[in-house]
């Protein structure tokens, strides 16, 4: 499970409306008949239209400065293992999303009207998407890139040769193109993977739009706070502030495991990813001390992500490998190309 929280921001400025983002999230509804439309949902309803989302989020920005985000985007990215575990069930994912937003509310060190923040204080709308496309940061695109560039150049050369603008042997160029296509590292159905192509397998994920202001449009709830938990004097009274991201991410993970009786492997855990960033030596040590069955599954999960670790001690070479591995796994998880 991989979650992200991103503030509404384009370039150096914050736009005044959520409309562009909502329109983007409607892409899978284009050309769909009414009965197959995929609506937004939250803890109070599940057939919410894009017009309602835009209207309510845009209207819920009282007293925010132009430099402050009006909303935040949360993405919930289950792995393919997790999706298979719940049979890629949309109803289960909707139920889980609502529980995630309960945990999001709990992560605020705030009180509203003397009570801790709860889901009823949030104004949010979620949308399930079932497809992902390849982007420039995906391993497949990066490794295919030299081949694709060469193929494109040769195809342009073919056009020039046929027009008489360039000397060359058409059959020889065609043969070279065919050779390169066969050598491309990553293909789907015999075709080289290019940016924009849909990813295979289960790619279901959830986008959540959550207003910066609470449901009454009176209180600011920013998950971007640099404080996890603190108290400050404001207008003559002491006010709690802060948002604990670690608590949120770990609680969301535990909630999935509890709801669906999911047995999470060491390498799937948020705490393990944090440890890999801070102390790769300890990460490697814990990985190698796992019971045989768990360790085998861990290495299988890592191989599926296109990554391997040496199995013979923590030598200087292993330390170097771990540094590269840490960067690779972080990129793979961020781009949701990791399948564990």
Image (cartoon, rainbow, N blue to C red):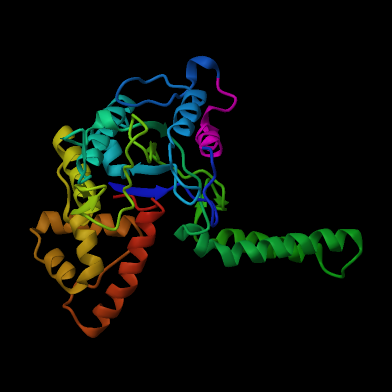
Estimate the x, y position of residue 285 in percent, counting from the top left.
13, 70
Residue 71, x across and y down, in percent:
42, 41
Q: Is residue 165 above or below residue 48?
A: below
Q: Main secondary structure of the magenta part?
A: helix
Magenta region: 18-32
Q: Residue furthest top?
A: 35
Figure check: 324 above or below 112 = below
Q: Nearer the viewer, residue 8 or 189?
A: 8
- Asked if the magenta segment contains residue 203, the reply would be no
Q: Residue at x 50, y 30 (%)?
A: 54
- The answer to whether any part of residue 179 appears in the image is no
Q: Is residue 140 left or right of residue 204?
A: right
Residue farthest toward the right in the current orientation of the protein: 164
- Given residues 275 and 251, the one toward you in this image is 251
**Magenta stretch encompasses residue 26:** yes
Q: Residue furthest bottom?
A: 316
Residue at image position (26%, 54%) is 301
Q: Residue at 41% x, 32% y: name it.
A: 127
Up-down: is 6 above or below 21?
Answer: below
């Amino acid at each position: 499970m991989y979650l992200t929280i991103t503030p509404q921001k384009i370039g150096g400025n914050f736009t005044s409306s959520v409309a562009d983002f909502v329109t983007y999230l409607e892409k899978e509804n284009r050309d769909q008949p009414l009965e197959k439309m995929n609506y937004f949902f939250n803890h109070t309803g599940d057939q919410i239209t894009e017009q309602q989302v835009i209207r309510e989020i845009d209207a819920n920005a009282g007293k925010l400065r132009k430099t402050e985000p009006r909303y935040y985007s949360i993405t919930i990215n289950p792995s393919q293992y997790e999706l298979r575990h719940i049979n890629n069930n949309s109803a289960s994912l909707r139920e889980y999303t609502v529980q995630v937003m309960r945990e999001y509310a709990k992560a605020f060190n705030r009180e509203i009207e003397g009570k801790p923040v709860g889901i009823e204080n949030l104004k949010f709308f979620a949308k399930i998407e079932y497809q992902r496309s390849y982007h420039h940061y995906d391993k497949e695109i990066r490794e295919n890139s030299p081949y694709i560039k060469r193929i494109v150049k040769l195809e342009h050369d073919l056009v020039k040769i046929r027009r008489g603008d360039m000397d060359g042997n058409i059959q020889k160029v065609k043969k070279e193109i065919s050779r390169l296509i066969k050598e491309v590292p990553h293909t789907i159905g015999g075709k080289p993977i290019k940016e924009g192509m849909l990813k295979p397998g289960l790619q279901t994920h959830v986008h959540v739009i959550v207003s910066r202001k609470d449901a009454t449009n009176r209180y600011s709830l920013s998950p971007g706070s640099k404080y996890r938990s603190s108290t400050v004097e404001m207008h003559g009274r002491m006010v709690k502030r802060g948002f604990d991201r670690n608590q949120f991410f770990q609680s969301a993970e535990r909630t999935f495991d509890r709801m669906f009786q999911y047995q999470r492997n060491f390498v799937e855990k948020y705490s393990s990813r944090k440890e890999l960033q801070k102390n790769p030596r300890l990460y490697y040590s814990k990985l190698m001390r796992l019971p045989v069955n768990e360790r085998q599954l861990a290495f299988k999960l890592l191989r599926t992500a296109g990554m391997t670790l040496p199995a013979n001690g923590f030598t200087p070479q292993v330390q170097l490998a771990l540094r590269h591995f840490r960067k690779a796994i972080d990129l793979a998880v961020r781009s949701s190309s990791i399948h564990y």
